[in-house]
Structures are given as C-alpha cells and as structure tokens.
Amino acid sequence: MATGDVLTVDKLAGEVGSTVTFPAVLVVDGDNVVSSKADLANYEVTAEILGAVKGPKINIMHYRSKTGYKRRMGHRQPYTQVKITGIKAGK
C-alpha cells in the first residue's frame, strides 16, 4: 500500500472522517525491506475512515433429506473503507 490508496478492512469503530492508526507489518522502500518486529515498531500507518460498506451476499442453505427440513439464510459482512494518509518512520 502507498499513500492515497483506498483499502477495505473489517469493520472499525469510529466516525466518518476520523483518523485511525495501524502498525506496519512489512515496509518496502525500493531495495530496502524491513520485516523484523523490532524495526517495524518504529513505523506507523495513519488512515482516514471514508465510510461503511458491505461485502457480497452469501446464501446459506440447510437441508436434510426425507424430513422436510429446509432453511435458507443469508449473510453480508460489514467492512470499513479507509484511505491511507501517511506512513511515518521513527516514532
């Protein structure tokens, strides 16, 4: 990800327009790759909440033969869209 990217993540608590911070998992800067836990503690990713969205509808069907049992359900996972506003090094 880079500054300006829009990502869809699991639902976050917060208002539209508020800022959230994420810990860095992997940092790639050209040929320089940072992946050790001690070095990643110095990095921080900030993002702005754009709004709530829902994932695709999943249809679930339960059926047992010879008993007349049928049950139909559906599910849509709630997500939050965030826009990356900054990646800082050196807390």
Image (spheres, helix red, strand yellow):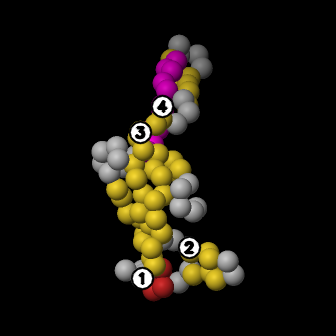
Q: Amino acid at mark 2?
A: Leu
- Towards the viewer: 4 or 14: 4
Q: Which residue is mark 2?
A: 26
View extreme (bottom): residue = 38
Residue 90's label in the rendered image is 1
Closer to the chain start, of discs 2 and 3, is: 2
Left or right of 31, for residue 12: left
Closer to the chain start, of discs 1 and 4, is: 4
View extreme (right): residue = 31
What is the chief secondary structure element of the magenta stretch?
strand
Left or right of 5, for residue 17: left
Q: Nearer the viewer, mark 2 or mark 1?
A: 1
Label 2 to label 1, Cα distance in Å? 15 Å
Label 2 to label 3, Cα distance in Å? 26 Å
Q: Amino acid at mark 1?
A: Gly
Q: Secondary structure at mark 2?
A: loop
Q: Amino acid at mark 3?
A: Ala
Look at the image and tell me whether residue 9 can be seen. no
Query: Residue at left 52%, top 18%?
Result: 70
**Magenta region:** 70-80
View extreme (top): residue = 68
| Residue 71 point in image, percent of width and height | 49, 20
Closer to the chain start, of discs 2 and 1, is: 2
Residue 52's label in the rendered image is 3
Q: Secondary structure at mark 3?
A: strand
**Magenta stretch: includes residue 34:** no
Closer to the chain start, of discs 4 and 2, is: 2
Mark 2: few, some, or many residues within 10 Å (few <14, many ≥20)? few
Looking at the picture, does residue 48 appear above or below residue 55? below
Mark 3: few, some, or many residues within 10 Å (few <14, many ≥20)? some
Look at the image and tell me whether residue 48 can be seen. yes
Q: Which residue is mark 4?
A: 75
